[in-house]
Image (cartoon, rainbow, N blue to C red):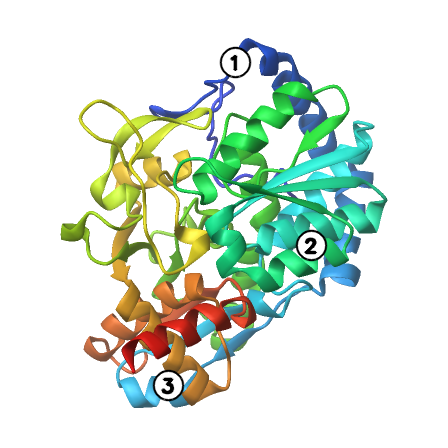
């Protein structure tokens, strides 16, 4: 897998991607982060760790995930061909398992018997509970009480796997608040607890570490695209909340200037409504959850509440590497609202027999928006980051409201 084979030298030694990233945490966590940084540096350069990680990805997760040509939908839309990187076929149904396997192996190396996690859509919580069961660890998952309601199936899955799910009642009762509570737990129990952060955010080394574990997605795409089409795609498209699935597919392509990188944020009810989760489109630099990045905040620096039909994108910040990719111009960030995501959710169901996660449906919607204006030989590679079983209640509820 070569998790230490870097396409460029960011972050720097202090965890910065240009002006973003870094470490903004209480003094209590500084030594824990330093220990984590040392442990990860040793692990990523240890052939035994890399070999075990690769074995688990192949035999437990089910990698490599295939690239699928959505021919019928492409024909209906006209123009470019839409290709799907099928992360929905992984064990647990999303890309999240790639990262939780890596972090759980690291936790075991560090002799931490207890793992904690935060989750919005529930997929990261399920993935954390899964690896905790796999390696015999205690697991506690923090989840906003609003997300507990709209992701009841995933809450039940976590319980079946032996995890304790803690509903968070503070703030907007969504992902941001779950992350706050998980941070508090870690400060209190740092001696025996490993915090498995689910996205490319948080203090250094988390943005780098999660990116490295998820970059298996993009590395597979490089080989698969060459084998299937004899070339790389014209654009790679992925949804962006915190941004781990996007960084996972973007990262190996960063040096390939011929491939556009397009991140799709959640516009919710529309940017003008103020009820959205588009940190890069409508936010400004600030500090959130231990790192400097683009944040949705008011004039006094207070974090704004967000909205997205997809619980996994309902977050007021974004990973610092995405902030750097935006400012550097290497990646383009766009938005899709709830209505557009729902339309593409239904289209993929009807034309391809695939039920996508509502998060992934944002990326699908943007591909559907631009495909008709492109030539038929153009290739759009969309990261289908998860399956939509977890979203059936939300989709059905929305359909009842409209009828």
Q: Nearest the camera: 362 or 174?
A: 174
Depth-wise, is mark 1 or mark 2 nearer the camera? Answer: 2
Query: Residue at image x 37%, y 60%?
Result: 309
Q: Residues within 10 Å of mark 1 (few under 14, many from 20)?
A: few
| Picture coordinates of residue 403, whole percent (x, y) | 29, 83
Q: Nearest the camera: 79 or 354?
A: 354
Depth-wise, is mark 3 or mark 2 nearer the camera? Answer: 2
Q: Secondary structure at mark 3?
A: helix
If you read the primary sequence from the N terminus, does the residue marked by circle 1 or circle 2 appear first? Answer: 1
Query: Residue at image x 53%, y 64%?
Result: 386
Q: Is residue 114 visible?
A: yes
| Cα distance in 3D space between marks 3 and 2 | 34 Å
Q: Which residue is mark 2?
A: 158
Depth-wise, is mark 3 or mark 1 nearer the camera? Answer: 1
Q: Which residue is mark 3?
A: 73
The mark found on residue 26 in the picture is 1
Rendered view: 333 above or below 224: above
């Amino acid at each position: 897998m070569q998790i230490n084979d870097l396409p460029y030298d960011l972050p720097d030694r202090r965890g910065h991607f240009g002006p973003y990233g870094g470490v903004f945490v209480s003094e209590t966590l500084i030594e824990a982060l330093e220990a984590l940084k040392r442990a990860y540096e040793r692990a990523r350069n240890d052939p035994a760790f890399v070999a075990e990680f690769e074995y688990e990805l192949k035999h437990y997760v089910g990698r490599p995930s295939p690239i699928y040509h959505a021919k019928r939908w492409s024909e209906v839309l006209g123009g470019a061909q839409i290709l799907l990187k099928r992360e929905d076929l992984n064990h647990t149904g999303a890309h999240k398992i790639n990262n939780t396997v890596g972090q759980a192996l690291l936790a075991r190396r560090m002799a931490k018997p207890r793992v904690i996690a935060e989750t919005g859509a529930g997929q990261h919580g399920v993935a954390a509970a899964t690896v905790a069961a796999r390696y015999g660890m205690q697991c506690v998952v923090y989840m906003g009480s609003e997300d507990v309601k709209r992701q009841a199936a995933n809450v039940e899955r976590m319980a079946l796997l032996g995890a304790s799910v803690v509903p968070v009642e503070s703030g907007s009762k969504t992902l941001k608040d779950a992350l706050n509570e998980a941070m508090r737990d870690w400060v209190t129990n740092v001696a025996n607890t490993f915090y498995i952060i689910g996205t490319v955010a948080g203090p250094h080394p988390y943005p780098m570490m999660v990116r490295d574990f998820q970059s298996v997605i993009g590395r597979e795409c490089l080989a698969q695209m060459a084998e299937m089409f004899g070339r790389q795609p014209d654009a790679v498209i992925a949804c962006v909340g915190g941004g781990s699935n996007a960084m996972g597919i973007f990262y190996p392509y960063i040096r390939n200037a011929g491939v556009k990188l397009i991140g799709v944020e959640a516009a919710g009810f529309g940017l003008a409504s103020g009820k959205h989760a588009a940190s890069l489109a409508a936010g400004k630099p600030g500090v959130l959850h231990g790192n400097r990045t683009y944040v949705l905040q008011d004039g006094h620096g207070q974090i704004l509440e967000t909205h997205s039909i997809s619980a996994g994108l309902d977050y007021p910040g974004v990973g610092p590497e995405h902030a750097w990719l935006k400012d550097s111009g290497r990646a383009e960030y766009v938005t899709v609202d709830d209505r557009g995501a729902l339309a593409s959710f239904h289209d993929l169901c009807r034309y391809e027999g695939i039920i996508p996660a509502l998060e992934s449906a944002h990326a699908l919607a943007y591909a559907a928006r631009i495909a008709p204006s492109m030539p038929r030989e153009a290739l759009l590679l969309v990261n289908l980051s998860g399956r939509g079983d977890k979203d059936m209640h939300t989709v059905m509820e929305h359909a009842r409201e409209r009828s």
